[in-house]
C-alpha cells in the first residue's frame, strides 16, 4: 500500500482531505519562476538543464506544499528529439517545422533519445529533493495532441490542419501516432525508473475529435502507451487527461485503462460523480476562477470537494494555471481544500 496520498487515491482509496496539485503549478504566475527563466535565457534551456528543471519543479512545493510535484518539462520535447525544430518565442507559444505525409516514414531515423537524458537526470534529482510525503509525477503528451503541433507547426484553435491530415492521409497518420506512442511510452518508462511515482498523459486537444476520431486517434494511442508502460513497469500508476472529451470520458477510461481520468471544468459535477463510480477522478476547477479569486473561487472549489470527496479524487484545475493568477489565491485554495480556510 502506498504511503503518499496521491498514490493511494490512484490505487482507488478515498482520502480526506483529497490530495491537491495544479496543472502548470510551476510557471509564470510565480515571480521565482520568471526570475529563473530570465536567467536561463529561454524555456527549453530550463527544460534541458537538470539544475534549473529541478529548481523550478520544487518552487511551488516550497510555497504551497502540494501533495504532488510535476516534473518541469514540456510535451514538445518528443518532437524536439525528432528534430522538428521546436522553439518557444516569447509571447507566441510554440513553433515547429510542420511535417508532411512523406516525412513520416523517415522520422524515426531522426530520433535522438539522448536529447531527453537531462530530463531523466532531473527526475532522479527531484525525487531525492522532495519531502517523502510528496509524490513526483512524470508526464508526456498524448500522441494526438503532440501530432497536432507537429502537423500545424503551432497551436491552432480547432486543430483543423491535423484533422484534415488524418482524413486525407490515414495510413501515414496512424503510423505517426504509433511512433509518438512508442517513443512516449519509452520516455515514461525512463521517468518511472528514474524516480517518478506516477505519470500523467496530457491530451489537451482530444475535444476537437468526432466519435471515430476520438477512439482511433485519442484513446487507442493512449491505450498503447499504458499497455507498454505497464509491461515494463508493472502496476505503473497513470492519469489520463483528455481535455474537452465530455461524453467520451467513460469510453476513454474504459479503453485506456488509466488509473484516474482528468476532468476539465466543463464536466458537470453530477457527471463527474457518475464517472467516479468507475474509478478515481482528477479536476476540475476552472483556471479562470483562480484568476477571479475571492468568493467565486471558494464557492466553486467547495462545490467540487463536496461533490467528489466521498470517493477517490485528486483536486486539480480543469486545465493549466494561467500567468495572471495571484500566488496568494493559490494559497487560499490549498487551505480551503485542506479544510483550513
Ligand atoms: C499543449 C501542451 C504544451 N505543454 C504542455 C501541454 C499539455 C497541457 C496543456 O494543455 O496546457 C504540458 C506542460 N507544459 C509545461 C508543463 C510543466 C509542468 C507543470 O507545471 O505542469 C507541462 C505539464 C511547462 C510549460 N510549457 C510552456 C510554458 C510557458 C513557457 C514560458 O515560460 O514562456 C510552461 C511553464 C510553453 C508551452 N508549451 C505548450 C504550449 C502550448 C505552450 C505555450 C503556452 C503558454 O505560454 O502557456 C505545449
Image (cartoon, rainbow, N blue to C red):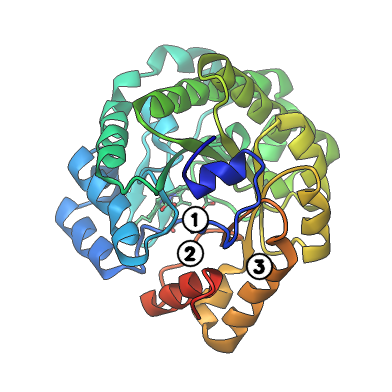
The answer to whether 182 is drawn above or below residue 129 in the figure is above
Mark 1 and ligand 1: say if the CB distance to the nearest ligand atom is below 8 Å: yes
Residue identifier under label 2: 321
Residues packed near mark 1 inside 10 Å, few (<14), some (14 to 19) or many (20 plus): some
Where does the image place residue 6, in percent across and percent down from the top left? Answer: 52, 47
Looking at this view, is 195 or 4 the one in front? 4
Kindly state the secondary structure of the residue where label 1 is placed.
loop
Residue that lies at the very extreme toward the left in this rendered image? 39
Q: Quadrant of residue 138?
A: top left
Q: Quadrant of residue 174?
A: top right
Residues packed near mark 3 inside 10 Å, few (<14), some (14 to 19) or many (20 plus): many
Horizontal side of residue 92 vs 201, given as left or right? left
Q: Residue at x 32, y 28 (%)?
A: 116
Residue identifier under label 3: 305
Residue 277 visible in this rendered orientation of the protein: yes
The answer to whether 319 is drawn above or below residue 238 in the figure is below
Quadrant holding the N terminus: top right
Residue identifier under label 1: 23
> In whole angstroms, how far apart are the C-alphas of marks 2 and 1?
6 Å
Mark 2 and ligand 1: say if the CB distance to the nearest ligand atom is below 8 Å: yes
Amino acid at each position: 500500500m502506498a504511503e503518499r496520498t496521491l498514490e493511494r487515491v490512484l490505487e482507488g482509496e478515498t482520502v480526506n482531505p483529497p490530495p491537491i496539485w495544479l496543472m502548470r503549478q510551476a510557471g509564470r504566475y510565480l515571480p521565482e519562476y520568471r526570475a529563473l527563466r530570465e536567467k536561463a535565457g529561454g524555456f527549453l534551456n530550463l527544460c534541458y538543464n537538470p539544475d534549473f528543471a529541478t529548481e523550478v519543479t520544487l518552487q511551488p512545493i516550497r510555497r504551497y506544499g502540494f501533495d504532488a510535484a510535476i516534473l518541469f518539462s514540456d510535451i514538445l520535447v518528443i518532437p524536439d528529439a525528432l528534430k522538428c525544430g521546436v522553439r518557444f518565442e516569447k509571447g507566441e507559444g510554440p513553433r515547429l517545422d510542420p511535417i508532411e505525409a512523406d516525412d513520416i516514414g523517415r522520422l524515426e531515423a531522426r530520433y535522438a533519445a539522448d536529447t531527453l537524458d537531462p530530463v531523466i537526470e532531473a527526475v532522479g534529482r527531484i525525487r531525492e529533493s522532495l519531502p517523502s510525503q510528496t509524490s513526483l509525477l512524470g508526464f508526456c503528451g498524448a500522441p494526438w495532441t503532440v501530432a497536432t503541433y507537429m502537423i500545424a507547426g503551432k497551436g491552432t484553435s480547432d486543430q483543423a490542419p491535423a484533422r484534415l491530415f488524418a482524413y486525407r492521409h490515414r495510413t501515414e497518420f496512424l503510423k505517426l501516432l504509433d511512433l509518438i506512442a512508442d517513443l512516449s511510452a519509452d520516455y515514461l518508462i525512463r521517468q518511472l525508473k528514474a524516480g517518478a511515482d506516477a505519470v500523467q498523459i496530457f491530451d489537451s486537444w482530444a475535444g476537437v475529435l468526432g466519435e471515430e476520431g476520438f477512439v482511433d486517434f485519442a484513446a487507442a494511442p493512449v491505450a498503447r502507451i499504458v499497455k507498454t508502460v505497464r509491461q515494463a513497469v508493472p502496476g505503473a500508476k497513470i492519469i489520463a487527461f483528455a481535455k474537452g472529451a465530455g461524453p467520451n470520458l467513460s469510453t476513454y477510461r474504459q479503453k485506456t485503462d488509466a488509473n484516474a481520468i482528468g476532468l476539465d471544468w466543463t464536466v458537470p459535477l453530477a457527471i463527474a460523480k457518475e464517472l467516479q463510480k468507475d474509478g478515481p477522478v482528477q479536476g476540475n476547477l476552472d483556471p479562470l476562477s483562480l484568476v477571479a479569486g475571492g468568493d467565486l473561487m471558494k464557492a466553486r472549489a467547495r462545490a467540487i470537494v463536496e461533490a467528489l470527496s466521498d470517493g477517490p479524487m485528486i483536486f486539480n484545475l480543469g486545465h493549466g494555471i494561467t500567468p495572471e493568477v495571484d500566488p496568494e489565491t493559490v494559497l487560499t485554495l490549498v487551505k480551503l481544500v485542506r479544510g483550513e480556510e
